[in-house]
Image (cartoon, helix red, strand yellow):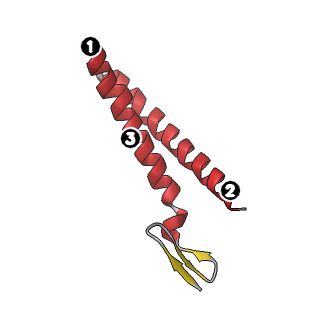
Amino acid sequence: MEHQNHHTTLTNGAISSEAGFRWIKEGLLFGILMFIIMQLILPYINGDDITQASLLIAVPVWLFAGIFYGLTIRYLRNRLKS
């Protein structure tokens, strides 16, 4: 039986590789959005300085946080499927 939706393709119980890396895309998107909000938008709204040093520190922090978020979501999705 074949089941297809916009994120995964199931064929005989096998999940396509696109679905296997979905968590990375979601995690990176989360990290990038949080970086933009926390390092650019909120300081601008509050009238704080946006420095090169704060941006350089924030990039790896938010990328790591995004990957961690993606892994957490992957774990929870797999746990709910079981």
**Residue of label 3:** 32
Mark 2 = which residue? 80
- In the rendered structure, the answer to whether residue 14 lies left or right of residue 54 reads right
Residue, far bottom: 1
Mark 3 / mark 1, whichever is N-terminal:
3
**Residue type (three-letter) at the residue carrying disc 2:** Leu
Q: SS at mark 3? A: helix
Q: Residue 48, located in which quarter of the rendered image?
A: top left
Q: Residue at x 47, y 71 (%)?
A: 5
Mark 3 in CB contact with mark 1 (< 8 angstroms): no
* Comparing labels 1 and 2, the label whose residue is closer to the camera: 2
Q: Earlier in the sequence, mark 3 or mark 2?
A: 3
Alpha-carbon distance for marks 1 and 2? 43 Å
Placement of 13 over or under 68, stated as above or below: below
* C-alpha span from label 3 to label 2: 27 Å
Residue at the image position 41 percent from the left and 35 percent from the top: 34
Q: Secondary structure at mark 2?
A: helix
Residue name at image x 47 percent, y 66 percent:
7
Quadrant containing the C terminus in the rendered view: bottom right
Q: Nearer the viewer, residue 58 or 74?
A: 74
> Mark 1: which secondary structure?
loop
> Does residue 50 appear in this view?
no
Q: Is residue 5 above or below residue 59?
A: below
- In the rendered image, the quadrant that contains the N terminus is bottom right
Mark 1 and mark 2 lie on one chain; the one further toward the N terminus is 1
> x%, y% of residue 20?
55, 64
Whether residue 14 is visible here, answered yes or no, is yes
**Which residue type does callout 3 highlight?**
Ile
| Residue holding disc 1 | 47
